[in-house]
Image (spheres, rainbow, N blue to C red):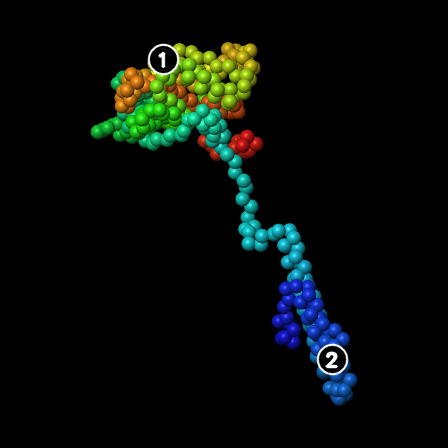
């Protein structure tokens, strides 16, 4: 009996062999059945019962082996991995700011820009002094900048990624062609239109004979790649301490195509970034000869570009981690 219960088989052929061995006409159990006739009458009842039990056990075990083989075959067919966890992990999606940041990387990457990064906790030199900020510039005020310590040296959270310009120029020789993505901090009240942190991408190109025309062409290419081939750009004179001349760049409103709508407040243009030719004082402060080299720089807010592209109405949504909002971008990448 124990022998029968221990029987095992891994193929249908092995099951059949077991059947032949025990239950076919010449099988062990059938032979025992044949001998049954010659057993004394007073033992027939007991032996008959035992023989029947044996036969049933063999039939049951064969059925069991067949069933095991069949369910294994089915699992193999369905390619079921029985070692996998039963818990489902919902798929995440890329954050909208990462989607747009990657688009920006790709566009400038195609023009030969490489990525440079720097620390978020900075000092006065890299964020302000090296970039030609006058000592009384309002950005240095407590109203705007989060200071960590005031002495012996001002340590602060960077208010822009332009600090990475300085770090790169201090450590590399021209030609330099970089974009610098990163988080920046400003002491602003949090609302739908402002936050105490946001993200920027800074661009810097330094070489011999770099001109404003190079800057304009580079930014036109960027605008067309990002917002569509019909996009026009417009440069308005502006002021930044680290560039001279400086400009703000607008793109033709991609919602009305430049005719004027509520989005562009009827002007047909929307502002997207600041730019200019790197001020010679900045080059000199970073150890680059301003007589030999010139360059351009630009800086943009990734939230701003994302808002224009996807029309996100409230800046706070970018950092609330509401999956209903995040899943709206599943299809974007
Ligand atoms: N750093 C500027 C800001 O945070 C943005 C900017 C403007 C960067 C013009 C530049 C530039 O490199 O040339 O507002």
Residue identified by numbered label 1: 245
Using the image, determine if residue 124 lies above or below residue 83: above
Vertically, is 23 above or below 253?
A: below
Earlier residue among tags 1 and 2? 2
Location of the N terminus by quadrant is bottom right
Instruction: Give residue 11's position: percent from left, percent from top.
Output: 66, 63
Q: Residue at x 34, y 22 (%)?
A: 144
Taking the image as shown, residue 40 lies to the left or right of residue 125, namely right
Would residue 181 appear left or right of 266 to someone viewing this image?
left
Question: Dot 2 surroundings within 10 Å: few (below 14), some, or many (20 or more)?
Answer: some
Is the residue marked 1 within 8 Å of ligand 1, measured from its CB? no
Disc 1/disc 2 C-alpha distance (Å): 109 Å
Residue 124: image x %, image y %?
Answer: 28, 25
Q: Characterize the local packing of mark 1: few (<14), some (14-19) or many (20 or more) Cα atoms within 10 angstroms.
A: some
Q: Is residue 271 visible?
A: no
Residue 31, disc: 2
Give residue 61's position: percent from left, percent from top.
67, 69
For the point 51% across and 14% down, the residue is 232
């Amino acid at each position: 009996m124990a022998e029968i219960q221990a029987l095992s088989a891994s193929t249908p052929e092995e099951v059949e062999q077991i059947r032949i061995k025990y239950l076919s006409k010449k099988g062990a159990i059938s032979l025992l059945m044949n001998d049954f006739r010659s057993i004394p009458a007073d033992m027939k009842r007991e032996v008959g019962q035992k023989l029947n039990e044996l036969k049933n056990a063999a039939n049951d075990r064969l059925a069991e082996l067949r069933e095991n083989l069949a369910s294994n075959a089915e699992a193999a067919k369905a390619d079921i991995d029985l070692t996998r966890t039963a818990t489902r992990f919902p798929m995440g999606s890329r954050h909208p700011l990462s989607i747009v940041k990657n688009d920006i990387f790709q566009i400038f990457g195609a023009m030969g820009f490489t990525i440079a990064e720097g620390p978020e906790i900075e000092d006065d030199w890299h964020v302000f002094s090296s970039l030609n900020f006058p000592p009384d510039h309002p950005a240095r005020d407590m109203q705007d900048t989060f200071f960590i310590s005031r002495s012996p040296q001002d340590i602060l959270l960077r208010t822009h990624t332009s600090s990475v310009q300085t770090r790169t120029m201090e450590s590399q020789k021209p030609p330099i062609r970089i974009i610098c993505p990163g988080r920046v901090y400003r002491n602003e009240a949090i609302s739908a239109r402002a936050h105490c942190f946001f993200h920027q991408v800074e661009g810097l190109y330094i070489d011999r004979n770099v001109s404003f025309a190079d800057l304009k062409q580079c930014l036109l290419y960027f605008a067309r790649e990002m917002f569509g081939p019909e996009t026009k750009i417009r440069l308005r004179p502006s002021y930044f301490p680290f560039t001279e001349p400086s400009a703000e760049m607008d793109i033709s409103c991609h919602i009305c195509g430049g005719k004027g709508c509520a989005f562009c407040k009827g002007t047909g243009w929307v502002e997207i970034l600041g730019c200019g030719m790197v001020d010679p004082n900045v080059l000199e402060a970073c150890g680059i000869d301003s007589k030999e080299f010139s360059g351009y720089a630009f800086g943009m807010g990734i939230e701003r570009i994302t808002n224009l592209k996807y029309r996100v109405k409230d800046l706070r949504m970018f950092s609330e981690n509401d999956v209903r909002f995040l899943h709206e971008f599943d299809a974007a990448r």
